[in-house]
């Protein structure tokens, strides 16, 4: 595993990332972990470093919903508005007349499944110019604000028409709350984090987590990283399950190992094998995940992971439909957080791995080069 350590060290030395923490496991145990660089000035990164994991929260939100499906309390094909009547008030944005949004009522009703799979019509402003403009001209706060009203993005296509990445999981968390009665943070704590022994995965920084939290950096025009004040909102009106968690590399790896092990880890179960199969199956049929073109390049590059490889979406993850030679196999699942926390798990080869930093732009080419080197080295070593 020495080459994995070398890849991390070279990446930091070459300014491809400000620092890195990574870990590798199979369903039975952790196989390797490593780190390079300082998580904050003068503090070396290590496996106890705490990260804002942003969209890696989505897999937790989908798992929470799957727990309710397993218990017979939630049907994936139920219209969202049956549980959350306010969802019926969302309009479909067709464009603009100058600065006036052109809105209409959708002809179809979005389902719970479509929320989870990014096929509901709800999309992010980072990769959609119309939603970016809508927030600007209406003054609606970004969903990242944690305000309940900020969930009320218009949709941009009819439910089921295509895949496009957005805020559906934030609404999904509200469904879990409405059905279960517990707030989503309490539900996830009691049903997932405590069960899997994930002490550093939290909605708020607790105990020593604040002291161990990594700083966030953004690459400037000169090519160097500078500090950026970026964090999920503390004690928001709504914990958005699209972005609101903190975690560590070992904690998140325990979650992935449980899924590799059909829902169980260390004799503690969060889902049945049948539920894990549903969670990780292609849930969008003939639709495919396409390239996401950035409209805010300072924050994110274009997202075109495994370009040319067929990709679908399960309830919780991006899913590959073909093997990638020297890398992950068909059926592998993965995703990332906007500050460049990345993960995948490969059931066919019994591999799970995480590669974390805290930097923007998301998926910028220097980082993605390192990610590919890391993944190829993982498969070469296992």
Image: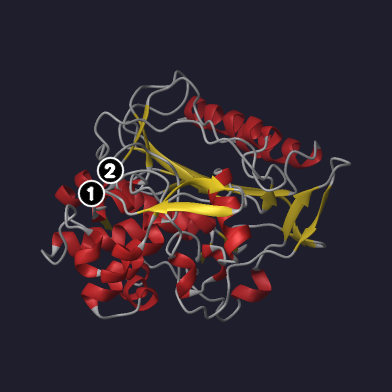
Q: Up-down: is 258 above or below 82?
A: above
As helix, strand or loop, the secondary structure at mark 2 comes to helix
- Residue carrying label 2: 280
Q: Up-down: is 350 above or below 115?
A: above
Q: In which quadrant will I find the C terminus?
A: top left
Residue that appears at 49% across and 57% down: 250
As helix, strand or loop, the secondary structure at mark 1 comes to helix
Residue that appears at 61% across and 36% down: 4
- Residue carrying label 1: 276
Horizontal side, residue 309 vs residue 366: left or right: left
Q: Residues within 10 Å of mark 2 (few under 14, many from 20)?
A: many
- Do labels 1 and 2 touch, CB within 8 Å? yes
Q: Quadrant of residue 349?
A: top left
Q: In which quadrant will I find the N terminus?
A: top right
Kindly tell me whether residue 380 is visible in this rendering. Answer: yes
Kindly tell me whether residue 267 is visible in this rendering. Answer: no
Q: Nearer the viewer, residue 354 or 237?
A: 237
Q: CA distance from mark 1 to mark 2?
A: 6 Å
Horizontal side, residue 23 vs residue 10: left or right: left
Q: Quadrant of residue 207?
A: bottom right
Q: Nearer the viewer, residue 154 or 22?
A: 154
| The label number, if any, that marks residue 44 in the structure image | none
Q: Residues within 10 Å of mark 1 (few under 14, many from 20)?
A: many
Q: Nearer the viewer, residue 227 or 253?
A: 227
Q: Nearer the viewer, residue 90 or 290?
A: 90
Q: Up-down: is 305 above or below 80?
A: above
Tell me where residue 282 appears, x and y as whole percent: 26, 36
Tell me where residue 9 appears, x and y as whole percent: 73, 40
Tell me where residue 132 appears, x and y as whole percent: 59, 51
Tell me where residue 59 appears, x and y as whole percent: 38, 54
Rendering colour mode: secondary structure
Residue that appears at 82% across and 62% down: 42
């Amino acid at each position: 595993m020495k080459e994995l350590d070398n890849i991390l060290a070279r990446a930091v030395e070459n300014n491809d990332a400000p620092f890195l923490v990574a870990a590798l496991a199979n369903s039975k145990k952790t196989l390797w972990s490593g780190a390079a660089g300082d998580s904050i000035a003068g503090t070396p990164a290590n496996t106890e470093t705490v990260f804002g994991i942003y969209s890696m929260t989505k897999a937790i939100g989908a798992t929470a919903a799957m727990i309710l499906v397993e218990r017979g309390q939630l049907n994936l094909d139920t219209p969202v508005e049956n549980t959350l009547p306010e969802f019926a008030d969302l309009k479909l944005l067709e464009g603009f007349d100058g600065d006036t949004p052109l809105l209409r009522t959708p002809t179809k009703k979005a389902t719970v499944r479509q929320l989870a799979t990014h096929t509901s019509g709800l999309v992010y402003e980072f990769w959609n110019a119309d939603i970016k403009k809508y927030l600007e001209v209406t003054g609606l706060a970004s969903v990242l604000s944690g305000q309940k009203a900020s969930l009320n993005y218009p949709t941009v296509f009819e439910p089921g028409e295509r895949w496009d990445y957005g805020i559906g999981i934030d609404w999904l968390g509200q469904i879990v709350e409405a059905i279960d009665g517990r707030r989503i943070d309490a539900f996830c704590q009691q049903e997932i984090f405590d069960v899997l022994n994930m002490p550093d995965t939290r909605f708020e920084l607790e105990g020593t987590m604040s002291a161990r939290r990594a700083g966030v950096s953004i690459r400037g025009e000169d090519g160097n990283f500078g500090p950026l004040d970026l964090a999920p909102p503390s004690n928001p009106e709504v914990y958005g399950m699209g972005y609101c968690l903190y975690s560590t590399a070992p904690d998140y790896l325990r979650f992935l190992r449980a899924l590799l092990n059909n829902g169980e880890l260390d004799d503690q179960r969060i889902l049945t094998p049948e539920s894990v199969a549903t969670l990780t199956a292609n849930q969008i049929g003939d639709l495919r995940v396409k390239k996401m073109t950035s409209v805010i390049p300072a924050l994110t590059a274009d997202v075109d992971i495994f370009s040319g490889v067929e990709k679908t979406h399960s309830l919780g993850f991006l899913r590959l439909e073909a093997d990638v030679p020297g890398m992950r196999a068909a059926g592998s699942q993965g995703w990332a957080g906007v500050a460049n926390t990345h993960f995948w798990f490969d059931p066919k080869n019994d591999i799970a791995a995480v590669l974390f930093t805290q930097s923007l732009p998301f998926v910028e080419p220097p980082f993605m080069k390192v990610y590919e080197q890391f993944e190829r080295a993982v498969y070469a070593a296992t």
